Image: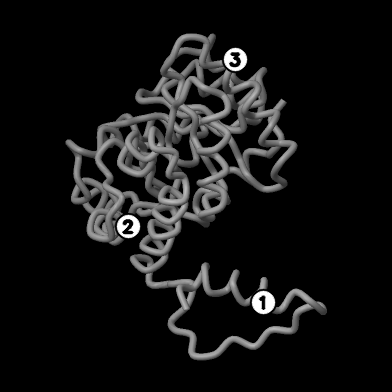
Amino acid sequence: MAKFMRHEVIGRILELGLTPIFYHGDLEVAKRIVQACADGGAKVIEFTNRGDFAYQVFSELNKWCNREFEDVILGVGSVIDPATAALYINCGANFIVGPIFNPEIAKLCNRRKVAYIPGCASPSEISAAEEMGCDIVKIFPGSRLKPDFIKALLGPCPWVKLMPTGGVDATRESIGAWIKAGAAAVGIGSRLIRKDLVKAGDFEAITKKVEECLWWVQEARGTPLFLGVEHVGIYSEEGLAAETAEWYAKIFGF
């Protein structure tokens, strides 16, 4: 059973504007990736169904995630049929994402009160998905549709919530272009969770990149987290002043 209600998942995705996407068949490595994303501020993470027995890895990863975090939402991507969706929902998936729109998956997710984010590539597909209760629609592949697609669609349909994936770079320019065009959020996979960083065990670099991407989303929205800080006043418990100061220095780059 999902830990988070559908409205909580949708709200968090729209609030943060960034969903990291990854797959790894090693449970311990997958845990470190989730930890790195969470440390960077990404609280909604998509684990893709792209390996043999991926559901077994996800099941254990989700149990661990629920124990370790109060506010990290784990879901599953690359789901194209209702049987696979049901399998992952029974493993506790908080949301289901797919590269295509499948009405039967939508019915299943509605029945189980689980958020479904299908992949669509045309206005008609997006409209059909919304009619089946999809609050957010994945624009896929983003590499083919480009930000102008979203900008054009929002003219006649300003209510749609679109999340491009498969063409969003983990850069200020790319994220800014999509968000300024009207994307409600972006999903980034291997360009954020880079294989070379995972292989090298450099999870701190992943955390830093996640922090940057979240900042760029807010910047493009015109609501950066901080406009500038000249002085921070803190009142720490006795003996914790140095540790607290180091934390602020790390987070804000002082």
Specify the label residue 56 is tagged with. Answer: 3
Q: Earlier in the sequence, mark 2 or mark 1?
A: 2
> Alpha-carbon neighbours of circle 2 within 10 Å: few (<14), some, or many (≥20)?
many
Task: Nearest to the eye among marks 2 and 1: give it.
Answer: 1
Residue at numbered disc 1: 242
What is the x, y in percent for residue 117? 46, 33
Specify the label residue 29 is tagged with. Answer: none
| Label 1 secondary element | helix
- Please say if the residues under marks 2 and 1 sit with CB atoms less than 8 Å apart: no
Quadrant position of residue 231:
bottom right
Image quadrant holding the N terminus, namely: top right
Left or right position of 22 against 31: left
- For the residue pair 223 and 182, the one nearer the viewer reads as 223
Q: Which residue is painted at 43% across and 44% down in the image?
A: 202
Height in image: 37 above or below 58? below
- For the residue pair 45 and 80, the one nearer the viewer reads as 45
Quadrant position of residue 247:
bottom right
- The amino acid type of the residue labelled 2 equals Ile
| Label 2 secondary element | helix
Q: Earlier in the sequence, mark 3 or mark 2?
A: 3
> Alpha-carbon neighbours of circle 1 within 10 Å: few (<14), some, or many (≥20)?
few
Q: Which residue is painted at 54% across and 55% down in the image?
A: 41
Left or right position of 231 against 111: left
- The amino acid type of the residue labelled 3 equals Gln
What is the x, y in percent for residue 167? 25, 40
Q: Which residue is painted at 51% across and 46% down in the image?
A: 37
- For the residue pair 68 and 199, the one nearer the viewer reads as 199
Residue at numbered disc 2: 179
- For the residue pair 124 and 46, the one nearer the viewer reads as 46
